[in-house]
Amino acid sequence: MMRIILHVDMDSFFSSIEVRENPEYAGKPVIVGADPKGGKGRGVVSTCSYEARRHGVRSGMPISKAYRLIPHAVFLPVNYEFYRRVSQNIMAILQKYAYKFQQVSIDEAYLDVTGKVKDYKEAEKLAKKIKAEIKRKEKLTCSIGIGPNKLVAKIASDVNKPNGLTIVKPEEVSQFLSPLPVRCIPGVGPKTEAILKDKGIKTIGQLAEMDGQLLISEFGRWGYELHRLALGIDEREVRERKDQKSIGRETTFEHDTLEPSEIYNTLDELTKKVSEDIQRKRYLYRTITLKVRLEDFTTYTRSRTLEHHTSNLTTLSSIVRDLSREFLDKEKKIRLLGVRVSGLLKIGENQTSLADFS
Ligand SMILES: [Mg+2]
């Protein structure tokens, strides 16, 4: 059966929420992320408003660079807990319109609306209704792409941002995809792009016309997928996200350090936050992983797996300290620390504590 898929993507989500909460920021370049510290700040831009994008600022860019581009921008810290609550409201709105629903990130979701609408005309009406409801209830805008599969819907949501609505019917897929750069295909990063460019392939259309066997010999299994995606073929189902696989936090030091007290304090803060996340989400963990990035950017991970699942903070904290010890003896300073737990087990509705597991 022919499917109709919507991809809904909130417009510059974090910065839009900040502008909603602080109307005096409207129309200004707003950058949510690490503290720029007058250009000396470390860490990166998390999200920025469209005004900031016009100055060349992008998500993931070092905050110091963003500061150089627009020192007069409004710089704000990431208030993740608050954004998550807004996200939950939005996901609840989206979910009720979907036959199948899949949240992909804090501000993005796929809706399979096959069966809820009978054709693309009705899908368009539904998308408008969704946009209006989000606008009315949350005072935020989103962009929606509609297509016969996830790939097309996803790319379509991105071509008319912000506040876009782009519909690509099955018979329009190849015409829609072919002029777009290969980078528009999710999964195509700088590496794949460079290899393709070497072969003279820049657009999705050129990629689609390539001999599939050649792509397979170049990229293996990914070459096969890539060719199908370029042809607009994507059979992935819209499905509820599986349970979370890990929970973690990390932080970049203001100055690279080897000072034990500073390192231990930071580890304690990270373990405390991870532990709070675990409690709130009602998980137990079994594996603890420490991530350490040194001043020369080499990155190490060290893990330990426990015999039983636990949610104990003291255990977490002492193991993390233990794992960190070898790095204190190194000559290189530490740039970043991260703490992650995995091997998660959801605590059931009726189980309230670890005692129920023993
Ligand atoms: Mg978004």
Image (spheres, helix red, strand yellow):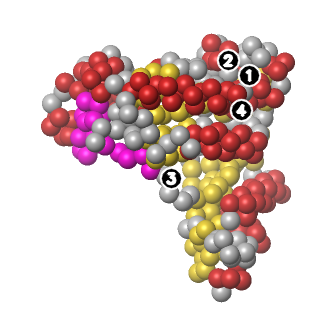
Label 3, label 1: how far apart the Cα atoms are: 31 Å
Visible residue check, residue 145:
yes
Instruction: State the image quarter where residue 152 is shown.
Output: top left
Instruction: Identify residue type, mark 2.
Output: Ala
**Most foreground residue, 124 or 34:** 124
Mark 4, residues whose alpha carbon is within 10 Å: few (<14), some, or many (≥20)? Answer: few
- Extent of the magenta region: 220-239
In the rendered image of this protein, does residue 32 appear above or below residue 219?
A: above
Label 3, label 2: how far apart the Cα atoms are: 32 Å
Label located before the other in sequence (3 or 2) = 2
Nearest-to-viewer mark from 3 and 1: 3
What residue appears at the point 37 percent right and 23 percent down from the top-left corner? 168
Instruction: Identify residue type, mark 4.
Output: Lys
Q: Could you say whether the residue bearing mark 4 is in a helix, strand or loop?
A: helix
Mark 1, residues whose alpha carbon is within 10 Å: few (<14), some, or many (≥20)? Answer: many
Give left or right: position of 89 versus 74. Answer: left
Instruction: Identify residue type, mark 1.
Output: Val
Instruction: Identify residue type, mark 3.
Output: Arg
Which image quarter holds the C terminus?
bottom right
Mark 3, residues whose alpha carbon is within 10 Å: few (<14), some, or many (≥20)? Answer: few
What residue appears at the point 82 percent right and 21 percent down from the top-left corner? 23
Q: Which residue is mark 2?
A: 52
Q: Which mark is residue 137?
A: 4
In the rendered image of this protein, does residue 129 appear above or below residue 272?
A: above
Mark 2, residues whose alpha carbon is within 10 Å: few (<14), some, or many (≥20)? Answer: many
Label located before the other in sequence (3 or 1) = 1
Which image quarter holds the N terminus?
top left
Mark 3 CB in 8 Å range of ligand 1? no
What residue appears at the point 74 percent right and 34 percent down from the top-left corner? 34
Label 2, label 1: how far apart the Cα atoms are: 6 Å
Question: Disc 2 vs disc 1: Cβ atoms closer than 8 Å?
Answer: yes
Q: Which residue is mark 1?
A: 30
